[in-house]
Image (cartoon, rainbow, N blue to C red):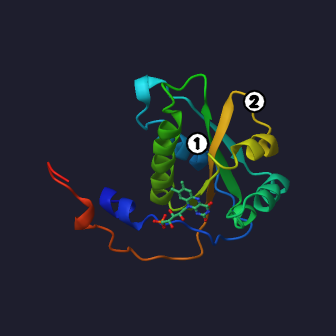
Amino acid sequence: MEFFNVLKERRSIRHYEEGFIVPFEDIKKIIEAGMYAPSAMRRFPWEFLVITDQVLLQKIEKEHKYASFASSAGVMIAVCEKESVSHAGMGVIDVAMASQNMMLAAYALGYGSCFCGVYPETHEKFADVLQVPKDVRVIGLISLGKAIETKGVPERYDELKVHVNRW
Ligand SMILES: Cc1cc2nc3c(=O)[nH]c(=O)nc-3n(C[C@H](O)[C@H](O)[C@H](O)COP(=O)(O)O)c2cc1C
């Protein structure tokens, strides 16, 4: 798939084919894409928790205000930061960069995804829900599954947001 098509066609998907689970082999490729993201001082502070357990997915649905599609997606990956490994508080940025790589990879492999924010408002609750170690901060949850909705490519280039040399 052509890179710029992947970039523009990836959309947040919130409707998924029930019962379909992305094979682990592809989940691994998606996580590998995340691990190719840039990272401040090469610390690579990310950790990934793959969630396929329906009970846990339903719990996420219940606890997250905007992830009502978690269990229908079939897979959610909690993208996390190991705080002690991060450089100068930049771990959240590293994890965000990894997340975008992952969603582009998911689209290129034929899957839909959606990033659901956790940090900074609900990371304490999700640390508890997902039982992560003390040093680990849950930054977000990425749903993965087979999309049953299609979305077009919106025009997003905005000349007014581009400044050259002087604001
Ligand atoms: C930090 C962040 C948090 C988000 N949280 C949620 C969320 O909790 N639930 C959700 O359905 N979408 C969430 N989104 C997805 C945005 O709603 C989506 O990216 C935006 O509407 C633009 O649409 P697009 O991804 O299709 O281009 C989040 C995106 C970001 C970057």
Mark 2–mark 1 CB contact (< 8 Å): no
| Residue 65 as seen in the image, left or right of residue 13 | right
Q: Amino acid at mark 1?
A: Lys
How far is the residue under mark 2 from the one under mark 1?
22 Å
Q: Quadrant of ligand 1?
A: bottom right
Q: Which residue is mark 2?
A: 133
| Residue 93 as seen in the image, left or right of residue 161 | right
Q: Amino acid at mark 2?
A: Pro
For the residue pair 160 and 156, the one nearer the viewer reads as 160
Q: Quadrant of residue 28?
A: top right
What element does badge 1 sit on?
Answer: helix
Quadrant where the N terminus sits is bottom left
| Residue 110 as seen in the image, left or right of residue 20 | left
**Visible residue check, residue 32:** no
Residue 68, given in percent of the width and then of the height, sits at 72, 67
What element does badge 2 sit on?
Answer: loop
Residue visible at 58% across and 69% down in the picture: 147
Judged by depth in the image, the label closer to the viewer, 2 or 1, is: 2
What label does residue 28 carry, if any?
1
Q: Is residue 146 above or below residue 165?
A: below
**Visible residue check, residue 95:** yes
In this view, which residue lies farthest toward the front?
Answer: 167
Residue 76, given in percent of the width and then of the height, sits at 67, 53
Residue 142, given in percent of the width and then of the height, sits at 61, 53
Quadrant where the C terminus sits is bottom left
Q: Is residue 16 above or below residue 119?
A: below
